[in-house]
Amino acid sequence: MRDVVDEHVETWARELPGLDPIKEEILARMARIVREVSEGRARGVAAGGAAPGEYKTLLMLRKQGEPYQLSPSALARVLGVSRAVASTRLGVLEDKGLVRRAHDTHDRRRVTVELTSAGHTLVDALLEGEERRERDILRPLDEDEQNELAELLRRVVLHLPVTD
């Protein structure tokens, strides 16, 4: 069965005879899958009433495990944003009741940010929606094929330069 990538590759193969069609098919299909995952995530996050940056912030807190907290500076660092951007984002999330800032119980000078029950519920619901969409994307492959694809992609990723 043909897909949109086949036409794309055929067109470029006519224009650029030196084009490696297999490489182009692989990378174009990977790009198409990434685009579908990203767009699906954006739709799900928007439907949940959060902006992408807010979702990333909630995810980073959720990823910490109980008690789902970080200092504002550590959160800014893992998000790759300035402290000012993180502070603004936290203010919005706090106004929505999704996070709370609290003084550290051992050192009152330190502040921690933690997920509220509402924040935990929202991020888990968004993650469940993401899981369903991603499972649907991979539905054409059986478990063995998914494992094989995962291993092949791991080999490609291990070949890439290491980045932060």
Image (cartoon, rainbow, N blue to C red):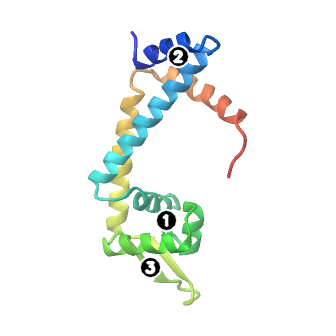
- 152 left or right of 49 in image: right
Any mark on residue 12, and which?
Answer: 2
The kind of residue on which mark 3 rests is: Arg
Q: Looking at the image, tell me whether mark 1 or mark 2 is earlier in sequence order.
A: 2
The residue under label 3 is 101
Query: Could one spot residue 71 in this view of the protein?
Result: no
Q: Residue at left 59%, top 70%? A: 74
Please state which of residues 34 and 60 is positioned toward the viewer in this rendering: 34
Q: Looking at the image, tell me whether mark 3 or mark 2 is earlier in sequence order.
A: 2
Q: Residue at left 40%, top 35%? A: 36
The answer to whether 32 is drawn above or below residue 25 in the figure is: below
Please state which of residues 151 and 56 is positioned toward the viewer in this rendering: 56
The kind of residue on which mark 2 rests is: Trp
The kind of residue on which mark 1 rests is: Glu
Residue 115 in the image: state x and y as whole percent: 41, 68
- Secondary structure at numbered mark 2: helix
Please state which of residues 94 and 13 is positioned toward the viewer in this rendering: 13
Query: Could one spot residue 150 in this view of the protein?
Result: yes
The residue under label 1 is 66
Q: CA distance from mark 1 to mark 3?
A: 16 Å
Whether the residues at callouts 3 and 2 have beta carbons within 8 Å, the answer is no
